[in-house]
Image (cartoon, helix red, strand yellow):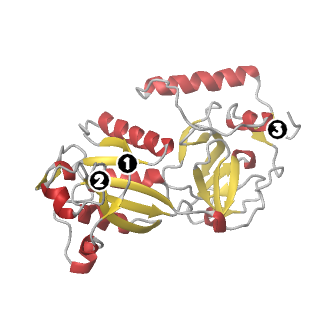
Amino acid sequence: MNAFLVRETPMRTMIHATLGLLLLVFNGAQPQEKKMKLNPLSPEEKQVLLNKGTEAPFSGKYVHHKENGVYVCKQCDAPLYRSSDKFDSHCGWPSFDDALPGAVRRQPDADGRRVEILCATCGGHLGHVFTGEGFTAKNVRHCVNSISLQFIPAETMKPQKAYFAGGCFWGTEHYFKQAKGVLSTTVGYMGGHTKNPTYKQVCYENTGHAETVEVAFDPALTTFEAIAKLFFEIHDPTQADGQGPDIGDQYRSVVFYTDDEQKETAERLVSLLKKKGLKVVTQIAPAETFWPGEEYHQDYYEKTGKTPYCHFHTKRF
């Protein structure tokens, strides 16, 4: 262990672990082993990310870092903060006045005074959040350990994709296109067995496909979780094999995940909705070949000037 780290005592570490279990119990959750790809950590990184230690002030490499890009979790690579939300607080640690939507989780610190912030994906310790200090207009300071982060320059970041089926793809695309960080959308078909299907085949033949929207998004501006939350709010996830007046298997509700992180996020959101009393029927399935739909279906409402007839934004999170 390098001297620049403030060590945790065995008793403090035990208190942290016990508190974590108690929070799970009070929240009605059960500790689960998650199959998540995690990066190997050095002893110094483990002391902060796992044992909730703190690096010494002004010792981290990102304290005065100014480059354009996004900061991700050192342990799981989940995007956490935009460089545009970083500011100089002169406190000795990287400071941000906002996090990417759904990327950071807050919980009471073991000291009983502060609020701890953790990576919402892997639970790694990031630091603490403070309010009311007046540094920026948002009046929030995420005080983050440099060692908990990894920086990805903007020029090296590639758009990510997500796939959702939730009724007529005209309506879902309409709302996705308006979301922050979404670069492009394409409507099409996924989840069936017919290659390169036509709209007529999907509607009248047993292709097995669902009307699907491919969403390309900038991970420096938004997250899969934020887009998935929007998905669950712009359609009715409790309606099986249909959406509003559109009835049929091609209108079923599905999250087609591209990796384990997307799968886990979708499962967690479904669990949250069920705890709220919703009888969610949304399927969570691996993404398959996406077949783009006919040109006249693309940007349908934008082309026609009409508005969705069976999709409405209902706040659920």
At label 3, counting other C-alpha atoms closer than 10 Å, the crowd grade (few under 14, some 14-19, many 20 or more) is: some
At label 2, counting other C-alpha atoms closer than 10 Å, the crowd grade (few under 14, some 14-19, many 20 or more) is: many
Tell me how many marks there are.
3
Provide the residue designation for mark 3: 5
> Where 229 falls versus 26 (above or below)?
below
Tag 1 or tag 3, which sits nearer the N-term? 3
At numbered mark 2, what does the secondary structure look like: helix, strand or loop? strand
Task: Please state which amino acid type lies under the numbered disc 1.
Answer: Phe
> Where 288 falls versus 267 (above or below)?
below
Q: Quadrant of residue 198?
A: bottom left
At numbered mark 3, what does the secondary structure look like: helix, strand or loop? strand
Query: Is there CB contact under 8 Å for labels 1 and 2?
Result: yes
- Marks 1 and 2 sit apart, C-alpha to C-alpha, by 8 Å
Tag 2 or tag 1, which sits nearer the N-term? 2
- Marks 3 and 1 sit apart, C-alpha to C-alpha, by 42 Å
Residue 14 position in % (x across, y down): 67, 20
